[in-house]
């Protein structure tokens, strides 16, 4: 799978779950592997690119979660 396509899928998963569920990075990797056949290493690299670009952030609420940064 193309890296840009994978990043789009990750962003959409997090966006759709906003306000309902917080994704832990491991849960996100498992879901991508199960539904899209993406390896953990591939998913991790794509998530890292989204984090580095500021598109997604880690939040800490009793554990690490992936979220869209709040709009200012």
Image (cartoon, helix red, strand yellow):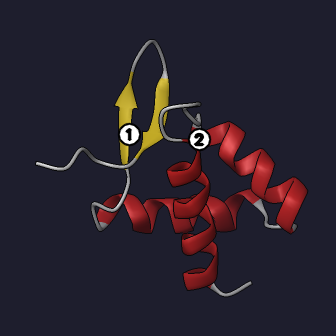
Question: 20 or 24: which is nearer to us?
Answer: 20
**Residue 55 at x, y percent in the picture:** 34, 62
Residue 10: % across, % down: 59, 61
Q: Which residue is mark 1?
A: 58
What is the x, y in percent for residue 57? Answer: 35, 47
Which quadrant holds residue 67?
top left
Disc 2 element: helix
As drawn, is 43 to the left or to the right of 53? right
User: Is 52 rendered above or below residue 1?
Assistant: above
Residue visible at 76% across and 57% down?
32
Nearest the viewer among 71 and 37 is: 71
Q: Are marks 2 and 1 in contact (CB under 8 Å)?
A: yes
Density class for disc 2 (Cα within 10 Å; few <14, some 14-19, many ≥20) is some
Q: Which mark is residue 25?
A: 2
At label 1, counting other C-alpha atoms closer than 10 Å, the crowd grade (few under 14, some 14-19, many 20 or more) is some
Q: Is residue 28 above or below residue 51?
A: above
Q: Quadrant of the N terminus?
A: bottom right
Q: Earlier in the sequence, mark 2 or mark 1?
A: 2
Q: Secondary structure at mark 1?
A: strand
- The extreme left residue here reads 72
Compared with 60, 31 (above or below) is below
The residue furthest top is 62
């Amino acid at each position: 799978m193309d890296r840009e396509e994978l990043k789009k899928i990750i962003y959409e998963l997090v966006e759709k779950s906003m306000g309902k569920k917080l994704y832990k990075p491991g849960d996100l990797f498992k879901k991508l592997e199960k539904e899209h056949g993406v390896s953990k290493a591939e998913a991790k690299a794509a998530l890292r690119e989204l984090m580095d670009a500021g598109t997604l952030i880690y939040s800490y609420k009793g554990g690490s979660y992936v979220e869209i940064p709040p709009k200012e």
